[in-house]
Image: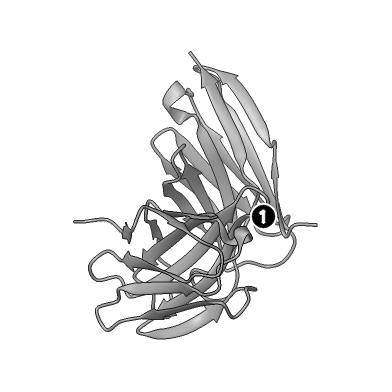
Amino acid sequence: KNEVEQSPQNLTAQEGEFITINCSYSVGISALHWLQQHPGGGIVSLFMLSSGKKKHGRLIATINIQEKHSSLHITASHPRDSAVYICARERGSQGNLIFGKGTKLSVKP
Amino acid sequence: KAGVTQTPRYLIKTRGQQVTLSCSPISGHRSVSWYQQTPGQGLQFLFEYFSETQRNKGNFPGRFSGRQFSNSRSEMNVSTLELGDSALYLCASSLGGQGARTEAFFGQGTRLTVV
């Protein structure tokens, strides 16, 4: 069993829909990262959080430390949000990340 | 300011050869981490360097090595290449240091193909 589980694996949405991607992890963390990867490979760090909630534009990330669960929400989704979203648990030192398998999001116009 | 730069972007090597990949972090960042991404295994942590010292290492064979220079630029080396080493190799830089964690910035990656 992977230490970091994401769901769903694939997600298709219509433009404007509210989207939620879930991430569960099995052991304690020092930080939880949400990353976005577009075709071609480049990765963008969206959020790094260890408690509570963070918001950036239409993106919201929450984490529940007790339940070992995090969610990434996208409000008013847009085709340009189409990408693979990856959550990663930071273990010990910075940079030592355990990654989920990713959620492939496709937003249709 | 300039982002994380990885060179080369694409590379084709033959089995048994060795390869060196380079990563130039964002100016002022002292931590550089390397990751391997394959379709089968997804993203996996290789190692992390801070101030020229390897702070952590993932579960990869000794053929995978790295180093960091005094200007924080980092290189990773893979010796005796195998077909399974074909992957996208990504590096990420951050301010690093003890205390509060800081955001990581990723390069575009080097796509290595071993034939």
* A28 to the left or right of A51: right
Q: Residue at x 61, y 59 (%)?
A: B83
Residue nearer the viewer, A41 or B63: B63
Q: For the view shown, which residue lies furthest in the left direction?
A: B1
At mark 1, the secondary structure is: loop
* A20 to the left or right of B26: right
Residue A59 is situated, as x and y percent measured from the top left of the image, at 46, 37
> Could you tell me which chain the residue with mark 1 belongs to?
B
* A40 to the left or right of B95: right
Q: Quadrant of residue A18?
A: top right
* A102 to the left or right of B13: right
Above-or-below relation of A4 to B66: above
Residue B71 is situated, as x and y percent measured from the top left of the image, at 24, 78
Specify whether residue A51 is in view. no
Q: Residue at x 49, y 83 (%)?
A: B55
Label 1 crowd bin: few (<14), some (14–19), many (20+), radius 10 Å:
few
Q: Residue at x 46, y 38 (%)?
A: A38
Specify whether residue A31 is in view. yes
Residue named by callout 1: B41
Residue nearer the viewer, B83 or B4: B83
Q: For the view shown, which residue lies furthest in the right direction?
A: A1
| Quadrant (top left/top right/bottom left/bottom right) for the N terminus of chain A | bottom right
Q: Quadrant of residue B46?
A: bottom right
> How many numbered callouts?
1
Q: For the view shown, which residue lies furthest in the bottom direction?
A: B53
Above-or-below relation of A107 to B71: above
In this picture the colour scheme is: one colour
Residue nearer the viewer, A49 or B107: B107
Q: Identify the amino acid type marked 1.
A: Gln
Residue nearer the viewer, B62 or B35: B62
Residue A64 is situated, as x and y percent measured from the top left of the image, at 65, 53
Residue B8 is situated, as x and y percent measured from the top left of the image, at 34, 58
